[in-house]
Image (cartoon, grey):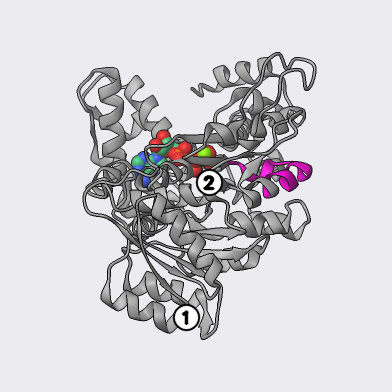
Amino acid sequence: MVQHTGAQHSALIVDDERDIRELLVMALGRMGLRCDTASSLAEARGHLARERYALCLTDMRLPDGSGIDLVAEISARHPNTPVAMITAFGNVDAAVEALKAGAFDFVAKPVDLNVLRDLVRHALDLHKGRRSTRDTVAERLYGRSPAMTVLRDTIAKVARSQAPVYIAGESGVGKELVARTIHSESPRARGPFVPVNCGAIPAELMESEFFGHKKGSFTGAHADKPGLFQAADGGTLFLDEVAELPLPMQVKLLRAIQEKSVRPVGANVEVPVDVRILSATHKDLAALVAEGRFRQDLYYRINVIELRVPPLRERQEDLAGLAERILERLALQQGRAVPRLGEDALAALREYPFPGNVRELENILERAMALSDGNELTAADLRLPRPLAPLPTAAPSPPTHPTLKPGAVDPRTLSPRDTGTSALPSFIEEIERAAIVQALQENRYNKTKTAAALGITFRALRYKLKKLGIE
Ligand SMILES: Nc1ncnc2c1ncn2[C@@H]1O[C@H](COP(=O)(O)OP(=O)(O)OP(=O)(O)O)[C@@H](O)[C@H]1O
Ligand SMILES: [Mg+2]
């Protein structure tokens, strides 16, 4: 039974088959909804003009046109009426098309009453407690640049839908924060948000991690264990680093998303799950699809809506405000006064390209706070990673502010022949430093991974960090 507060909600059911209309009226009636029905687009439009509905369910094929058109019309003219599409079983294209047109969800025929109940609950939740969420979120996902303003507006829109969202963007731009924001603004906000780093699960455990397992289904399975899908039931499953999923797992995942149910390892029945899928990667997923390393059908399914989080260097306007908020947060955590950012420090930040984006800004500020004892951070406190300096022709001059984008000069292709011999050791040190800093950023400051990427041992890396004075 779906709980509903206050006045009775009403729903509009649009289907040209009488049996289906009657079935849905009965099912929704049991959930406390009053229903109107229509067997054509024209009839539906008539109802919509007279009444405000808490939910509309529409069939795809109608005698006078397509349900998709109705979805588009309702989302444009009646944005407070969530509309869900009834699709033929397994018709992915129709479901995707409906979501793109603005449907908040879809339900496959024959309609499973459990799925329908979840759908109705989410639709009604959209009407409840939808105040002030935007303000609280604006506090968290900061950004006043035009790019971030557009992004936040888009988040507010997609949060209301159940459509899968794919979040693209460089390392450290805030993809996970965007995913959390979508969840917390959605009707699933009171459900769990379950982030999964797809690159961190060993391939042999993946199926059991995602779908759970029955006791005794393999060595080490001492008890029944629910998987991540079940853990996220009623909420959001965030597939982070989704590009890292092995191909066989991609097939199984697609199936779970499609069927809205999972089969735990060793179980012989499917368990229905009500989960919204968000995913992200810093890799170019479309390129991986083209290379055959990511399945096109899964890509198509998770990428119904794509959000692009812009790199920090493309939103200079946000830099000062972002730095301020990060300093406030760090100061609060450390129980000290909020340090100010000096003019020279801000100027230095503005010139820095931030290959590691907001996360790198956080790291830089945290280190600066640790180094400075005063109440104002200077450019020197920031100790910005040195740029890969332009090659000096005679003796190298000490690097000034960074101007080169990372990767503009590949340190491995540099040769000490290009420099004055007397400065050779320090020149090599600079190259080493640049390579290490870049590898650290690429591996998100994970030293084990960084060492592996550089092809040196963990101990050797630790030694070099110390020698070069890299924190
Ligand atoms: N717009 C923003 N406002 C406030 N904090 C932000 C913003 N964007 C990112 N951050 C912060 O920066 C850090 C990195 O963000 P997040 O983990 O979401 O990035 P990501 O894109 O998932 O990174 P990665 O690719 O490394 O996984 C987090 O601490 C996050 O809170
Ligand atoms: Mg992330």
The answer to whether the residue bearing label 2 lies less than 8 angstroms from the nearest atom of ligand 2 is: no
| Residue holding disc 2 | 114
Q: Earlier in the sequence, mark 2 or mark 1?
A: 1
For the residue pair 357 and 351, the one nearer the viewer reads as 357
Q: Is residue 267 left or right of residue 18?
A: right
Q: Which residues are magenta?
A: 240-254
| Residue holding disc 1 | 40
Q: Position of residue 78 (x, y in %)?
A: 32, 70
Numbered mark located on residue 82 in the image:
none
Q: Is residue 168 magenta?
A: no
Q: Position of residue 29 (x, y in %)?
A: 39, 55
Disc 1 marks a residue whose amino acid type is Ser
Q: Is residue 444 left or right of residue 321?
A: right
Q: Is residue 249 magenta?
A: yes
Q: Secondary structure at mark 1?
A: loop
Main structural element of the magenta stretch: helix, strand or loop? helix
For the residue pair 338 and 278, the one nearer the viewer reads as 278
User: Which residue is painted at 66% across and 39% down in the image?
Assistant: 262
